[in-house]
Amino acid sequence: YTRKIRRHCQLPAETIDGFRVQVHANIELVEEVAAVLDNGGEGIGLYRTEYAYMNRTALPTEDELVEKYAELASIMAPQKVVFRTLDLGADKAMNQYGDLNEANPAMGLRAIRFCLKHPQLFKTQLRAILRASANGNVAIMFPMISGIREVRQAKAWLAQAKAELRREGFEYDPEMPVGIMIEVPAAVMIADFLAREVDFFSIGTNDLIQYSIGVDRTNHHVSYLYQPLHPATLKSIKLVVDAAHQAGIEVSLCGEVASDPFCVPILMGMGIDSISLTPQAIPGIKRIIRQTKMRDCRELLRKVLECRTVHRINGLVMENIFNAY
Ligand code: PEP
Ligand code: MG
């Protein structure tokens, strides 16, 4: 059975009735690229760049980053690589920064907040990503955005990095798409405003579930409350997808939900443009999509959105999966 799934993994993720979803990969290290290609990944939807900064004493230099990033971009070209800027803090700590000793790190100085507080470190990475963009199809995205001002500040640093590179004679893609991750309820609620500031969204459900249900994603005492199929999670995702499409931008989902066979048909029903998941899960999810009808996904979504409890939703998705496969 595993062999059969693997044989099909290089085929497009297209439903029986002809709807195509892009299936991208999440990676933490450039070395994972072989697994991405082997498993039928159609690009990198989330490169968690912070891992190259962790477990080391000195910060990587711009040239060191360019070497890695450009290699990744050129191996994947013409397929896309989405570089997420540093998401340090909370569950991804870096020892050099004492200011990360916080009582509530998940709500503290993490991700884009941390980068905006350390502009030199941020700019080194922005310059490296821009320089890599000359070698392939590169996009950039900012994590943990909670308001318009953060997006504009991040974009201002990006503009400054571009101006510097231009002056210094480095090449980069002037049209490199800029996106943001939707990971906190504030961003969900203003998704319509945010959509006018960027080229794409990527929904980070690992954090969105944590912040919307108020449950620490690393705390096993409350893990029973960490529910991807909570009506609040599903309504949030739908709101973001609709806001993106209304503004004419693409929306992806790169949390663990994207590798959950029970959740993917619901995401398809919402009209998600792409999903990004761990490389090893791609063949199985592609197979599910190829055996699905969009008509059934929409019907499932309609029913699910009427449910008031996770319990009811779980029942519906189970029924759906057993009927379909
Ligand atoms: C997420 O929050 O869903 C996400 C993809 O980012 P990370 O898991 O790296 O926080
Ligand atoms: Mg996250």
Image (cartoon, rainbow, N blue to C red):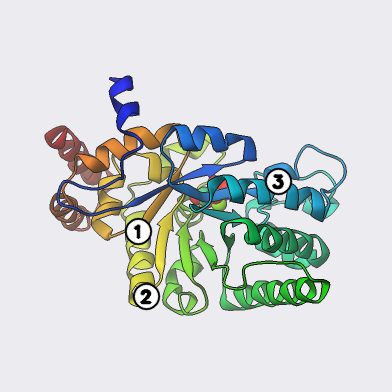
Q: Residue at x 73, y 62 (%)?
A: 115
> Which residue was labeled with disc 3?
68
Q: Which mark is residue 248?
A: 2
> Is label 1 in a helix, a strand or a loop?
loop
Separation of residues labelled 2 and 3 (CA atoms): 33 Å
The three-letter amino acid code for the residue at tag 1 is Asp
At numbered mark 3, what does the secondary structure look like: helix, strand or loop? Answer: helix
Give the position of the C terminus as an image quadrant.
top left
Please name the amino acid that badge 3 sits on. Lys
Horizontal side of 207 relative to 290 (left or right) equals right
| Label 1 or label 2, whichever comes before in sequence order | 2
State yes or no: Cβ of the residue under disc 1 lies below 8 Å from any atom of ligand 1: no
Mark 2 or 3: in front is 3
Compute the Cα span from label 1 to label 2: 12 Å
For the point 75% across and 71% down, the residue is: 161
In x, y percent, where is residue 143? Answer: 59, 59
Residue 109 pos. (x, y %): 71, 59
Mark on residue 111?
none
Task: Say which residue appears at 71% left-offset and 61% top-offset.
Answer: 131
3 and 1 marks in contact (CB < 8 Å): no
Q: Please tell me how crowded label 3 is: few (under 14), some (14-19), or many (20+) other residues with Cα within 10 Å.
A: some
Question: Residue farthest to the right?
Answer: 58
Q: Secondary structure at mark 2?
A: loop
CB contact under 8 Å: marks 1 and 2: no
Residue at horizontal 55%, vertical 55%? Answer: 82
Q: Which residue is mark 1?
A: 273
Between the C-alphas of marks 3 and 1, the distance is: 28 Å
Query: Which three-letter amino acid code belongs to the residue tagged 2?
Result: Gly
Q: Going by the image, does 18 lie left or right of 8?
A: left
Going from N to C along the chain, the mark reached first, 2 or 3, is 3
